[in-house]
Image (spheres, rainbow, N blue to C red):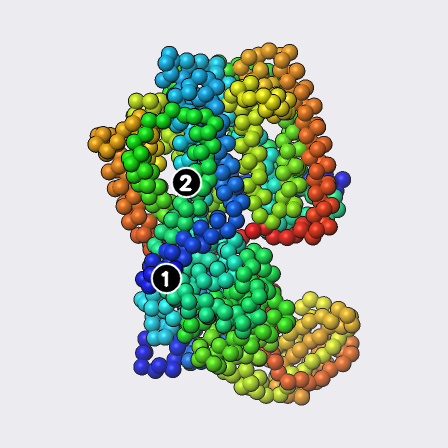
Amino acid sequence: MNRVDAEITVQVEGLRREFDSKEGKVTALDGVNLQVRKGEIFGVLGPNGAGKTTMIRILSTLLLPSSGKAGVMGFDVEKEPEKIRAVINMASGAERAGYDFISARGNLWFFSQLYGIPSEEAHRRINELSDMLGLQSYLDRKFYALSTGYKQRVTLVRAFINDPKVVFLDEPTIGLDVMTALSIREYILKQAKEYGRTILIATHNMAEVDAICNRVAIIDKGKILACDTPAALKRSLGAPSLVLEVSPPPPPGSLEPLIKLEGVKGYTASVDEERGLSRIQVVVDDDGSAQSVIDSVRKAGMTVVSNWRQQATLEEVFVALVGRGFREREHEASQ
Amino acid sequence: MKLPSNPWLRTAYARLWVRAKSIYGEPLWVAVNIGFPFFTSFSLTMVYRAYGLNSFTGFAILGGVMISFWGNVLWSMASQFNWDKQVGLFEIYITSPAPISAILVGMSLGGILGTAPSAAMVALLGWAIFHPPINAVWPAVVSVFALTLASLYAMGMALSSLYLAYGREADSVNEALHEPVSLISGVYFPSTGGFSPFPLAVQAGASLIPLTLGMDALRRTLFFGQGFGEFYLDLELLALAVMGVALLFASSKALKFLENKGRRTGTIAVRQR
Amino acid sequence: MSSLRAMVASVRVGWYREFNWTNPLVGFILRTVGPLASVIAASTVYYVGSINNIPPSFSPSLLAFILIGAALYAHVAAYSWVPTLAIAEGKWTYVFPQVYISPHSSLPYLTGRTLASFVTSTLTVIVSLILSFYILSSVFHTNIPFIVTPVSISLLFLAMVMNIFAALGLGLLLSAYALFATKFEWALPTYVAGLLMVFSEALFPVSALPHPVSDVANVLPFTEFMRASRQAMIYGDMYSYFSYLGLAILGGIIVLALGLLAFSYAENRARRLGVIDKKTA
């Protein structure tokens, strides 16, 4: 691992991880390369099963790579896990880890002691971090009595209690209401900007990535497909994508021919239940390709109720890279 | 209270605090923990008494006291990491710099502190109701008790690594272990020595369990007036000390091995639910 | 019809819940060693005390008394707490709220889970009785006076089946508490199991208890069930067997009625308080 460049806090080279399963070997990460700089909020965006959590687990020393190298703050995950553990922390949105019969404050104090933090300092940090997340008045409640949202806030306070240099967050706002998710994002932004922490967020929430990430790596089937700022990734698509509202809903398989059209990079479809329409978003190269898409949809027996062009979203970037949207990709993975 | 700055001690204290606070912060825990040991102890004491076997009533009461600790070792030591894994706490331990051994020692001390009130209640109620005949050498009783607990909880630490390796449905494994070990160890009756009905081979096997030696030593010091200097008692004390150290060592090695294995196979953070 | 379907499905779920975490044989073995050890331990307590008494007072007939009681008490304790387990566990996994909001399903669900556990604990108690009989006969070098004929075994089985009323009633009483509780509800069955051990003549005659406690214990359906079982397997008095069985059934129906009432009240209250889907600590 190159320790000379002090600005790089997370470095991954040719990272590979395979798992044994009943169906044979499953490759969760397939030769991943990336570098994250100090103070960056770095998003790892991809559908379920893409390899995001596996990467977080390797970097947080929970899991060893099958091959390749990974390092945090210049320390190797395989050879120097203890040194990494002293400078990192992690939190998963799905976890509500805590002792039910201890107060939130007691739980946070306990976790602070795992990092050897003096009690006085620990309480100061608990108060400061809790204040940022609106948790102060809940600190003395027993953990089991907290709602999901407040348990998640406790989790996020815990993730920063040891003043880590690098924090790994896996789906930090999953299952939370909009306002709570917003306050958590503000908190994460503050931690990176004011304290210079490197924060790696694994998520499939594109709004989150757009809102707070300096750079994002798009991952699918264990491979990094693209890595840049969200704005640059969206600009890379060039022409805005085409959106069609159609009726009746497309029969299964009827949209497959769209991929074969010249200038079409991919599509994703959804249903607007209220209006009884289906919405198809197609990433196209130019106006000519857009017209071919409209003609093809009409040929398939659907009526195009309306159509327009819109600025690319990160999902469309994904679609352009993979040919399918998140939803379709997750459906394929489950087959 | 100013805590030690040594990270190992700090971690051990924090884990002890969590456990003790959970119990003493909810006084109902004492009532909860007393149920099974008290009623089992009561029933077996009644067996001794109802059939005219009064001189043995103390055995059953002592059994009730020790079964409280044995239950704590199984349910709150051996399988604790399994529960921790399910709620995501175990991966927090692994990804922190805190030594696992400190967490285990903290859990043990907290477990002893937390179980002590219910064990004491069983002893007090048993003594008040049945007035068992006692012929105790109290310094020896206290020493034997402390050493027995140390070995028992060291066994709990060693078991915690087994549970990590074979963690599914830890409560079923606990239920399967609880009674057989109580039987073989002679929690309610002497399973080794002159009073034991078991064949020598079974007695020899039973003597490998710290609880067996501890129970026998406690009976000698509490009911038969034996103190330090008695050959078999001293032998049992020595064996308990050796077992305790060996189990501590084994648990530390096993947990490190399992952590590395878990990192290779990807099972550290796998939740069963 | 949907209630019956729900109950049958719950029996299936209960079976899988007990064994599906491993292969059935391993699961069965693990389920049996506990009760077997418990039976042997209780019997050994008596044996060790009696042969070392001055003068020795060991009686094979008393050993048989304790053996039957220890095995059957464990059997009842094992399945009577299943309704509480189903609710406590079901709140944690969110299964129970789903069951509750489906039509007429919470009672069939709890009954089905209990019946599944009755089957598994019946199997384990039969194995425990057989194994402990042979182990203790051999280790204690004694003849344990069991009556082992097709008739006696059928009568024992009949008594176990008839005891389901009482056990289910007890289970529903406990689960009524579990509907409200958000902590420690799993501890209540251990208390009740302990009380059963003391007050149902499992290991010693209830006459050894002081008045008026012994009077209450004397009329419990579980006590009558124990007595009927011992008549079937040890004493062979048919008149006494059917008398005790009748009292066990009558008492069981009363306990079941109380359990149903308590559960119905508890459901209503829990719904008003909004705790049916409140997770337990």
Residue A297 in percent (x, y) is at: 72, 77
User: Closer to the camera: disc 1 or disc 2?
Assistant: 1
Indicate the secondary structure of the residue bearing disc 2: helix
Residue shown at the point (72%, 81%) measured from the top left: A294
Check whether the beta carbons of the residues at disc 1 and disc 2 lie within 8 A of each other.
Answer: no
Mark 1, Cα crowd under 10 Å, few <14 / some 14-19 / many 20+, is few
Residue A124, position in %: x, y? 46, 70
Query: To which chain does the residue with label 1 belong?
Result: B
Question: Please, is residue B260 above or below residue C125 in the view?
Answer: below
Which residue is labeled 1 in the image? B2
Q: Is residue C177 above or below residue B126?
A: below
* Quadrant of res C157: top right
**Taking B269 as reference, is B144 above or below it?**
above
Q: In percent of the image, x 55 and y 21: which residue is there?
A: C210
- Whole-number angstrom distance, CA of label 1 to CA of label 2: 30 Å
Which of the numbered marks, if any, corresponds to residue B41? none
Lower position in the chain sequence, tag 1 or tag 2? 1
Q: Amino acid at mark 1?
A: Lys
On the image, the x and y values in percent for residue B84 come to 46, 54
The chain containing the residue under callout 2 comes to B
Q: Nearer the viewer, residue B185 or A58?
A: B185
**Residue bearing the label numbered 2:** B69
Q: Residues within 10 Å of mark 2 (few under 14, many from 20)?
A: many
Kind of residue sitting beneath label 2: Phe
Residue B155 visible in this rendered orientation of the protein? no
The structure residue drawn at horizontal position 69% and vertical position 71%, both measured from the top left corner, is A270
